[in-house]
Amino acid sequence: MKTLNCYVLLFCWKAICCYSCELTNITIAVEREECELCFMVNATWCSGYCFTRVRILSLYNSDTIIKNLSEAFFFFHNFQDPVYKYPPVSSVQQICTFKEVVYETVKIPGCGDHPESFYSYPVATECHCETCDTDSTDCTVRGLGPSYCSFSQNGSNQ
């Protein structure tokens, strides 16, 4: 059993070290609705995992924060149902998001009677973990993704 625990801890350590919050290359689809055209641009954005902090509401003093995995294991080991929500415990889920962005601009080619135009898009320059700010970030579980396009690249609808 100790060997299994060591393997699980090693796996978790590997996942945490290798997939931390960092800049990554992505492709963004830029659409030109008048032309039913889209093209792709390359950018950098934030991707990776962040720790979730568990907060225990103590009856005796102010909030106590579980700071490491061993404390969390000893606190939660009696609960068999992983979906069970223990009322005195709340968690603060953090996401990997941008700390700073700059805007880059691309020229969108014209088509038909429509002149060329310009499109500015955000590019992350620094990342960090924080709670999701719905004013600036899509906090959904699964969105369309940055490379989704309503039109194909040759101009016909998908």
Image (spheres, rainbow, N blue to C red):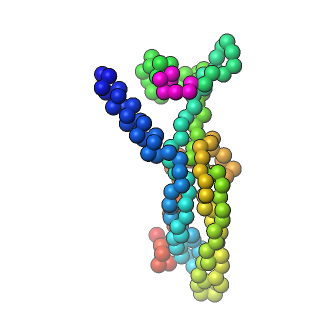
Residue 26 visible somewhere in the drawing: yes
Give percent across and percent down for residue 51. 54, 37
Queried whether the magenta region covers residue 71, the answer comes back as: yes
**Quadrant in which residue 58 is drawn:** top right
Can residue 34 be seen at all in this image of the molecule? no
Does the magenta segment cover residue 107? no
At horizontal 50% and vertical 19% (from top left) the residue drawn is: 75
Give the residue furthest to the top: 60
- Say which quarter of the image contains residue 109: bottom right
Residue occupying image coordinates x 66% and y 46%: 133
For residue 81, what is the image quadrant?
A: top left
- Quadrant housing the N terminus: top left
Q: Is residue 131 left or right of residue 3?
A: right
Residue 117's spot in the image, x, y percent?
65, 79
Q: Residue 66 versus residue 37: which sits nearer the camera?
A: 66
Residue at figure coordinates x 42%, y 41% from the top left:
15
Which region shows up in magenta?
Answer: 66-72
Q: Is residue 130 left or right of residue 76?
A: right
Between residue 21 and residue 39, name the one nearer to us.
21
Residue beneath the point at 42% across and 36% down: 13
